[in-house]
Amino acid sequence: MNTTAGNVVIAVKDWVAVRKRGSSGGNITVKGNGRVRLLVEGDTERTVSPTGLGSTSADVFVGKSSRVHIPDQASRRLQILGPKDTHTVVTGPGVTFDGIIYTPAGPTGSGTTYAMQGDIYGAVITGDLTLGQYGSIHFDKALEGESLPLSTEVSRLEYLHVATHRVNVTGQ
């Protein structure tokens, strides 16, 4: 997606899948200094079968060995925006996603984001977030102070720090 001449806005009625047809390894690269906003309405979801999740419906799917890349890790330059019932799946060996997934569920939505064996670099604003085995989210601190579209139904959560602390307990 070339943004050297300005910002790009793409509106999709149903769903988005990043992968090669019938296989894996699709790629998207954002070039230039502009921003890409991908608006996903999600009228009809696509059934996908990602590793560890079985068969599920998704509005946004980034499958195994796929890469959504922004040079210089400038995640603010790609925003995926969806309504409160958007289901996002980022999963599979070798999957990376640079950008912002903005699909807030609010108090009445059923939206979810699921990441397994994949890395998300940027930010995720969603309803339920599930990180499966080897799934990770790396918050881009350059996003602090970034202005995103807000709704009266969306909480003003600005930063969430999640850590894992391993403890060994032995008995006597």
Image: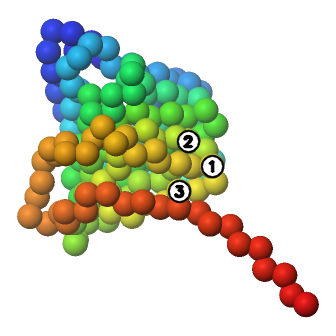
Camera-side residue of 166 and 58:
166
**In 3D space, how far apart are the residues under numbered discs 3 and 2 (Cα atoms)?**
9 Å
Rendering coords of residue 94 (x, y %):
61, 32
Question: Does residue 43 appear in the picture of this structure?
Answer: no
Q: Which image quarter is the C terminus in?
A: bottom right
Q: Say which element carries label 2.
A: strand
Q: Say which element carries label 1.
A: loop
Camera-side residue of 172 and 13:
172
Q: Amino acid at mark 2?
A: Gly
Q: Which label is found at residue 2?
A: none
Question: Does residue 1 appear in the picture of this structure?
Answer: yes
- Determine whether 97 is above or below 107 in the image: above
Q: Look at 39% across and 64% down and name the residue there.
A: 128
Q: Which label is found at residue 134?
A: 1
Density class for disc 1 (Cα within 10 Å; few <14, some 14-19, many ≥20) is few
Picture quarter containing residue 10?
top left
Are discs 1 and 2 less than 8 Å apart at CB? yes
Q: Residue furthest front?
A: 172
Q: Say which element carries label 3.
A: strand
Q: Look at 23% across and 17% down and name the residue there.
A: 33
Rendering coords of residue 11 (x, y %):
19, 32
Name the residue beneath numbered marker 3: 131
Q: Residue furthest left?
A: 152
Q: Amino acid at mark 1?
A: Tyr
Q: Look at 47% across and 53% down and name the residue there.
A: 114
Rendering coords of residue 169 (x, y %):
78, 80
Name the residue beneath numbered marker 2: 118
Q: How is the image coloured?
A: rainbow
First-in-chain label (1 vs 2): 2
Density class for disc 3 (Cα within 10 Å; few <14, some 14-19, many ≥20) is some
